[in-house]
Amino acid sequence: MARVVVDVMPKPEILDPQGKAVAGALPRLGFTGFGEVRQGKRFELEVAEVTDEVLAQVHEAAEKLLSNPVIENFTVRVEDQA
């Protein structure tokens, strides 16, 4: 089995209240030296084989289900190919 990963992040111009909350909590917990924090989502999809057709289906699923293309960007990558 192979693993295809879809990472979904808010577009840069979109406010990220969850990222802001994490950024505010880091120094309170003693973690310093970090700048802006953005929070996103990661989806791992197991596939039998990585082919162009499978990757096209993953892109389509990312556009229609896994992300909101109005406010989010996504990337697709093969992480583990057995």
Image: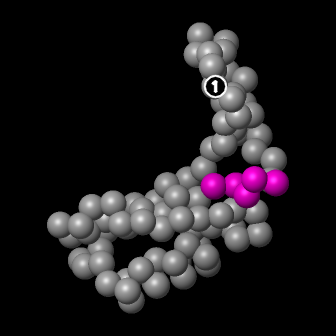
Task: Decide: is 58 above or below 53.
Answer: above
Name the kind of residue labelled 1 in the image. Answer: Phe
Magenta segment, prevailing SS (helix, strand or loop): loop
Say which quarter of the image contains residue 20: top right
**Magenta-colored span:** 9-13
Say which quarter of the image contains residue 34: top right
Q: What quarter of the picture does the N terminus occupy?
A: bottom left
Looking at the image, residue 48 sits to the left or right of residue 73; the answer is left
Q: Position of residue 62 (x, y in %)?
A: 55, 73
Q: Position of residue 49 (x, y in %)?
A: 25, 79
Residue at screen point 36% across, 66% down = 78
Q: Secondary structure at mark 1?
A: loop
Question: Who is closer to the viewer here, 32 or 40?
Answer: 32
Question: Who is closer to the viewer here, 66 or 15?
Answer: 15
Residue at screen point 66% across, 42% down = 38
Q: What quarter of the picture does the C terminus occupy?
A: bottom left
